[in-house]
């Protein structure tokens, strides 16, 4: 029987590339996101390779999450792989000038949303005594950088939850691990800078950042390891990046 993977934040960036990589392997896919038109486009692209089911919901809404997972048809109900990928950064401000609405958005999506989805999916994994959860974290969950305050706090929370999940779910034989990317060229910075494309572009110029495909390949490797192997915590950065604040740029 083919494995079934649920991917949050599947409509762009890392989540979309993980979906494409998994489809190449024939893994059944539950693609989750808030933009139905993008879900439809990805389903049309990948359905020749594997079976697809889309779920349109906001991870911040606990009721929507539960209803969406409960609505899965029987052929998609046994989720063996959960990719907690949905997440965003909003703003880049010192703590004294931060926008509380931005804080709420980051904590609601990056932390509470991850918890809501995981809780809904775990009912089946615990019952079957098996499964694999991959939490997409960040190097921001390993170190704090100037003006990253609440975003870094949210990703530190993901790091802590990743460790806690692994402890709590050990008795059920459920594997839990995280992949923590550094600078990856996606829509991340455009969202952070609220649509300011020119400012977002400066984040990725003068060096070779990671591509979403790089992370998708790594995630596929992690889930492809033998059942007795669990990649608990993996950090990956582009060669040009030494830390959150040290990046070798040509210009």
Image (tube, rainbow, N blue to C red):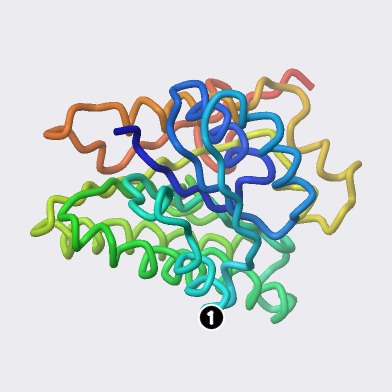
Q: Which residue is mark 1?
A: 63
Left of 114 or right of it: where is 48? right
Q: Position of residue 230 (x, y in %)?
A: 21, 38
Number of residue marks: 1
Of residues 43 and 197, the one nearer the viewer is 43
The residue located at (48%, 59%) in the rendering is 72
The residue located at (20%, 62%) in the rendering is 126
Q: Residue furthest front?
A: 74
Left of 29 or right of it: where is 80? left
Please tell me whether residue 144 is drawn above or below residue 57 in the rendered image: above
The residue located at (87%, 53%) in the rendering is 195
Of residues 197 and 98, the one nearer the viewer is 197
Q: Position of residue 7 (x, y in %)?
A: 51, 48
Residue 55: name its quadrant: bottom right
Residue 42: name its quadrant: top right
Q: Quadrant of the C terminus?
A: top right
Crowd class of label 1 (few under 14; some 14 to 19; many from 20; radius 10 Å)? few
Q: Quadrant of the N terminus?
A: top left
Of residues 70 and 182, the one nearer the viewer is 70
Please tell me whether residue 249 is drawn above or below residue 16 in the rendered image: above
Please tell me whether residue 134 is drawn above or below residue 154 in the rendered image: above
Q: Position of residue 23 (x, y in %)?
A: 52, 28
Q: Residue furthest left?
A: 171
* SS at circle 1: helix
The residue located at (27%, 49%) in the rendering is 176
Left of 191 or right of it: where is 149? left
């Amino acid at each position: 029987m083919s494995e079934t993977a649920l991917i949050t934040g599947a409509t762009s960036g890392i989540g979309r590339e993980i979906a494409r990589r998994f489809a190449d392997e024939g893994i059944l896919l539950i693609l989750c996101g808030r933009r139905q038109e993008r879900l439809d486009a990805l389903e049309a692209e990948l359905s020749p390779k594997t079976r697809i089911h889309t779920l349109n919901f906001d991870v911040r809404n606990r009721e929507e999450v539960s209803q969406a997972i409960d609505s899965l048809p029987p052929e998609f109900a046994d989720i063996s792989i959960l990719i907690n990928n949905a997440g965003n950064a909003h703003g880049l401000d010192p703590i004294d000038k931060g926008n509380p609405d931005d804080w709420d958005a980051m904590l609601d999506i990056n932390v509470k949303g991850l918890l809501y989805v995981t809780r809904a999916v775990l009912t089946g994994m615990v019952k079957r005594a098996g499964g694999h959860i991959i939490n997409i974290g960040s190097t921001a969950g390993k170190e704090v950088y100037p003006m990253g305050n609440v975003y870094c706090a949210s990703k530190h929370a993901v790091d802590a939850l990743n460790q806690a999940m692994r402890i709590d779910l050990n008795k059920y034989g459920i594997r839990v691990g995280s992949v923590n990317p550094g600078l990856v060229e996606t829509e991340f910075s455009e969202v952070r800078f609220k649509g300011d494309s020119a400012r977002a572009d400066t984040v990725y110029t003068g060096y070779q950042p990671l591509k979403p495909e790089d992370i998708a390949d790594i995630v596929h490797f992690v889930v492809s390891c033998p059942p007795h192997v669990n990649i608990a915590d993996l950090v990956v950065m582009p060669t040009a990046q030494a830390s959150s604040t040290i990046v070798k740029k040509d210009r």
